[in-house]
Image: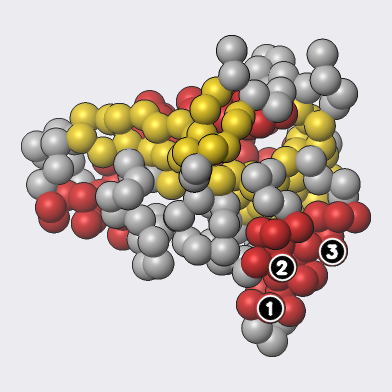
Amino acid sequence: MSNAKNIVVLVSGGGTNLQALIDAEACGELGPGKISCVISSKADAYALTRAENNNIKTRVLVRKEYADIASYSKAMRDALIEEKADVVVYAGFMTILDENVCDAFANKMVNVHPALIPSFCGKGYYGLHVHEEALKKGVKVSGATVHFVTAECDAGPIILQKAVEVLDNDTPETLQKRIMEQAEWKILPQAVKLLCEDKIIIKDGKTFIKD
């Protein structure tokens, strides 16, 4: 059994993915991982309330209080180092951080994206926009992807993916809800557990899971 790993979760909004992680930890499904801190880019994010309700330390780093991405990224890097983060999870975190953070926590930061990368990903593809575009294209399946975070948006090595059927009468909202419930909330805790257990190997930009 490896030693306990500190998981720091980055949030900007409601924190439904954070809740999935909190629930997974309560059931012993994060392996040696323990959510030690939640950092929000918005002071009024409901995710902070979820953290407080579960006695998890919170911090707020408001994006607007920093002149640019570089100074914000540096502040975030310093906060993550202070919190002794072993694993960093983007859970609906709406700010792209630069290589300052990505290099300091290389192969330790993961994000969940509400589509099957490389479809509907990259700059501008977040929240409902992703599902609007998927429906516009008429795809028959969509889903979610957990991937490593790099300085390039949605471009890091893919860890886990799960497909979800698209229905003829779907709206962006119904598709979003189904992808969250059937894919995001399942594969995000799984990927975090694998990372906490040191079971992910990266080779030539691809990931392999150790047995």
Q: Residues within 10 Å of mark 2 (few under 14, many from 20)?
A: some
CA separation, marks 2 and 1? 8 Å
Please give left or right for residue 104 compared with residue 162 in the image. Answer: right
Residue shown at the point (73%, 52%) measured from the top left: 105
Front in this rendered view, residue 185 or 191: 191
**Quarter the N terminus occupies:** top right
Q: Does residue 200 sit above or below 144 in this rendering?
A: above
Residue shown at the point (62%, 39%) measured from the top left: 18
Front in this rendered view, residue 104 or 163: 104
Q: Position of residue 157 (x, y in %)?
A: 49, 44
Residue picked out by circle 1: 70
Name the residue furthest front. Answer: 204
Disc 2 + disc 1, Cβ < 8 Å: yes
Count of numbered labels shown in the rendering? 3
Residue shown at the point (16%, 49%) measured from the top left: 135
Please give left or right for residue 142 compared with residue 85 in the image. Answer: left
CA separation, marks 3 and 2? 10 Å
Examine the image and state in which quarter residue 141 appears: top left
Examine the image and state in which quarter residue 2 appears: top right
Front in this rendered view, residue 34 or 152: 152
Residue picked out by circle 2: 100
Q: Does residue 24 sit above or below 76 in this rendering?
A: above
